[in-house]
Image (spheres, coloured by chain):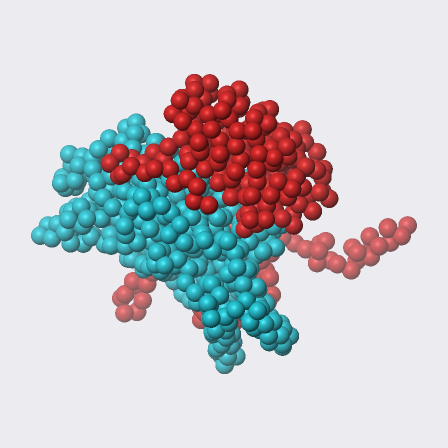
């Protein structure tokens, strides 16, 4: 019994190695995940539909736990606030930190959720929870929301993956127990775009086609012998990868197509350029793009760190929202800013730091049918406790799923037979919409 | 006569289906839990060394209240739905699965898991049994009724428009699908969304003309980056129920706009980086249904936009990339094609 199980695992690895190895050799492709779902992209979806207000998500992940008091839930005049001041915004009665003057001009579009609550106070667990709605526990690995979207909705653009993750940092965007094709296409450096996806210069088109034909023969033989779901999925990868290689859609990955002035406005750093890439991808029909922004774990010298980190973030966010708006993309693109937890209202003496604080923090959403200019939920006068409309981690994921029309009560079973739902038992915050 | 005989046969042959009694929790299910689960899933207690033992995963199966309350991570019992009830699902995992319950010893027998499954299917009736006191009431937060909220305005419009439309044009639709992605805008209505993602370079006025056979079913048309010209307006103008039109980054211009001025349901028109100028905007002035107009990167001027805003005071007209002050001046990035 045990032997068989291990043998099975080994077999999995070999097949994956075979495929990615071969993909690299024949196609010059690195870690391109399986890109199936062509049929689904042009047909009706298999999962029951719900009406949707959003078709795309840009998920901005603040890695490390972003301080709520110093960014989007300031408590002016209170001891817990420290030296950072609050400023008014274009939304009536909504104040944010002095470090976001540009974003303040657009808060009429944004719905802040200031009553976020997590049960997880450590990074790995908190990030996992935020991405999957389930606790990191036991042997099971849960799909992140982007993978659920890919699985339940398939692609919009038949040539592009449904799910992309830009920038390092959190590794929690993952297909979990779902098929590998729902894993995000990882892009480490937004300026380099998709590496190695063009036909190598040294291979002319005819040779390339011949190689493809030979590969197809090999594959048929392989697939005949191992006619398993996974093998068929890998097979599809070649087909899809070749399609992508010759496609105009590859340009979606190339931010050098953008005017220098706009690139500059987004900010000359990986997160800024990553957001610009996210916009291009959404424009070309990618459904779910995560962009990571690290460095928020401010145990020491929290206020110096805020002075460094917030202004570039402000610039990027303000430009992203304005750019999406001017192109008409904000109507159907939900932009979410999320983090795993907030930071302690009590300032740690001696090192001017703030520690992990999962019992109250702020996330926000805009676009995709969200009614902006509101602060949903509230913390007390010092930012310590939630006093109104608690929103749990599964709830915020259920809210995103709701906007995308995913059936949140649809049960899918993992290969081991356990039932799972897209946001566990989370309930959408419908007050954010309409 | 025949049917009567088969009915009798059926009654006779399948007593399990017809005459099965409801599961008695206390007599049948509880003994299984007591024997196989409670050692790990019961109220905190002190073991022989004096250490407090908490229930595994925060889950207690020794009381009705706790069972319905669930574990640290949420519900484990959903009356009527064994497929959503972890306390059943985990007992039927393959026996080499690390998550199988009970976590120690032999798996439950098929008869035992079937019983559990039936009890949950029948609504998880505990009879008179309550077991140990349940959690305090404050912990049992009211879960809001699942999403029966009213449709957002946009979706309500599609619902209303769809009512007068027959879901005709299936054969034309099948043909058009070779070049376009076509989906329903609402799961239970006839209206469609059509787009040409990845096929932009091959999508010209003739390809779009394939939509004519079911034009009145189209609510959303996305032609972004397609090779279409003003001539495509001849097809678009037939789409009486069109609410959203996206012509971003195409050669569409004033003549085309003039032709589609009769579309009375249009809510949003995206003319970002098109050839449209102030002259074309005149055509939009009477289109009172418009709520969102995108003109950044087109040939319109300040005066043209001001005029349009005057005529359509309720519409949001975007004409500039409104970068917040102080970031930098950005000029429209026109004509990159």
Give the residue at the far bottom of this rendering: A3
Q: Is residue B225 visible?
A: yes
Q: Position of residue B86 (x, y in %)?
A: 49, 57
A270 or B137, nearer to the observer: A270
Rendered residue at 55%/43% (across/down): B226
**Hey, which quadrant is residue B326 in on the image?**
top left
Q: Position of residue B272 (x, y in %)?
A: 45, 36
Q: Which chain is cyan?
A: A
Q: Is residue B144 visible?
A: no
A216 or A395, nearer to the observer: A216
Give the residue at the far right of this rendering: B1
Whether residue B189 sits left or right of residue A370 in the image: it is right
Q: Can you say whether A372 is above or below A237 in the image?
A: above
Rendered residue at 51%/44% (across/down): B225
Q: Which chain is red?
A: B
Rendered residue at 27%/42% (across/down): A314
């Amino acid at each position: 019994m045990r032997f068989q199980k291990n043998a099975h695992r080994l077999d999995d690895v070999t097949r994956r190695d075979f495929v990615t190895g071969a993909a690299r050799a024949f196609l010059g492709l690195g870690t391109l995940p399986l890109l199936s779902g062509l049929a689904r992209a042009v047909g009706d979806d298999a999962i029951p539909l719900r009406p949707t207000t959003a078709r795309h998500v840009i998920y901005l992940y603040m890695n490390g736990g972003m301080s709520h008091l110093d960014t989007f839930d300031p408590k002016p005049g209170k001891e817990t606030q420290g030296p950072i001041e609050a400023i008014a915004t274009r939304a009536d009665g909504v104040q944010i930190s002095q470090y976001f003057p540009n974003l303040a001009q657009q808060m009429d579009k944004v719905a802040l959720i200031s009553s976020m609550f997590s049960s997880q106070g450590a990074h790995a667990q908190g990030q996992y929870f935020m991405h999957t709605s389930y606790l990191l526990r036991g042997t099971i690995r849960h799909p992140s929301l982007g993978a659920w979207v890919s699985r339940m909705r398939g692609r919009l653009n038949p040539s592009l993956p449904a799910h992309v993750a830009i920038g390092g940092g959190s590794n929690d965007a993952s297909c979990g127990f779902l098929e590998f094709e729902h894993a995000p296409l990882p892009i480490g450096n937004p300026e380099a775009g998709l590496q190695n996806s063009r036909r190598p210069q040294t291979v002319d088109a005819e040779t390339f086609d011949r190689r493809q034909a030979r590969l197809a023969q090999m594959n048929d033989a392989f697939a005949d012998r191992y006619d398993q779901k996974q093998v068929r999925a890998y097979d599809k990868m070649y087909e899809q990868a070749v399609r992508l290689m010759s496609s105009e859609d590859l340009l979606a990955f190339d931010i050098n197509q953008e005017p220098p002035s706009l690139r500059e406005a987004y900010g000359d750093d990986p997160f800024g350029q990553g957001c610009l890439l996210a916009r291009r991808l959404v424009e070309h029909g990618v459904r779910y793009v995560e962009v990571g922004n690290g460095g928020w774990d401010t145990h020491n010298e929290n206020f110096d760190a805020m002075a460094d980190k917030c202004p570039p973030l402000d610039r990027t966010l303000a430009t992203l929202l304005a750019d999406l708006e001017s192109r008409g993309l904000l109507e159907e693109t939900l932009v979410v800013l999320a983090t795993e937890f907030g930071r302690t209202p009590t300032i740690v003496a001696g090192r001017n730091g703030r520690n992990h604080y999962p019992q109250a923090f702020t996330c926000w959403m805009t676009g995709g049918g969200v009614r902006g200019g509101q602060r949903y939920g509230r913390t007390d006068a010092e930012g310590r406790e939630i006093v109104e409309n608690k929103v749990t981690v599964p709830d915020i994921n259920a809210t995103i799923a709701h906007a995308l029309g995913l059936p949140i009560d649809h049960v899918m079973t993992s290969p081991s037979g356990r039932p799972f739902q897209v946001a566990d038992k989370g309930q959408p915050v419908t007050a954010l919409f309409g | 006569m025949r049917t009567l005989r088969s009915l009798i046969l059926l009654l006779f042959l399948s007593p399990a289906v017809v005459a099965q009694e409801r599961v008695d929790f206390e007599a049948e299910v509880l003994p299984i839990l007591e024997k196989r689960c409670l050692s790990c899933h019961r109220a905190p207690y002190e073991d022989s060394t004096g250490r407090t033992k908490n229930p595994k995963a925060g889950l207690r199966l020794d009381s009705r209240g706790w069972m319905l309350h669930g574990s640290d991570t949420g519900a484990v019992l959903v009356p009527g739905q064994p497929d959503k009830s972890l306390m059943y699902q985990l007992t039927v995992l393959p026996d080499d699965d690390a998550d199988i319950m009970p976590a120690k010893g032999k798996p439950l027998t098929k008869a035992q898991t079937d019983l559990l499954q039936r009890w949950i299917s029948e609504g998880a009736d505990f009879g008179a049994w309550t077991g140990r006191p349940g959690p305090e009431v404050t912990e049992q937060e009211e879960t809001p009724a699942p999403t029966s909220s009213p449709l957002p305005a946009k979706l309500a419009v599609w619902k209303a428009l769809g009512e007068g439309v027959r879901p005709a044009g299936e054969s034309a639709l099948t043909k058009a699908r070779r070049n376009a992605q076509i989906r329903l805008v609402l799961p239970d209505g006839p209206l469609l969304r059509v787009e040409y993602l990845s096929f932009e370079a091959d999508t010209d006025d003739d390809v779009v003309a394939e939509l004519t056979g079911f034009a009145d079913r189209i609510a959303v048309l996305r032609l972004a980056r397609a090779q279409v010209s003003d001539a495509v307006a001849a097809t678009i103008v037939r789409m009486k129920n069109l609410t959203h039109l996206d012509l971003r980054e195409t050669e569409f211009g004033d003549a085309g706009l003039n032709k589609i001025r009769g579309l009375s349901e249009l809510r949003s028109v995206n003319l970002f980086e098109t050839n449209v100028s102030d002259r074309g905007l005149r055509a939009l002035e009477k289109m009172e249904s418009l709520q969102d107009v995108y003109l950044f990167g087109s040939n319109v001027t300040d005066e043209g936009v001001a005029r349009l805003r005057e005529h359509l005071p309720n519409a949001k007209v975007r004409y500039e990339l409104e970068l917040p002050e102080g970031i930098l001046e950005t000029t429209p990035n026109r004509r990159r094609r």
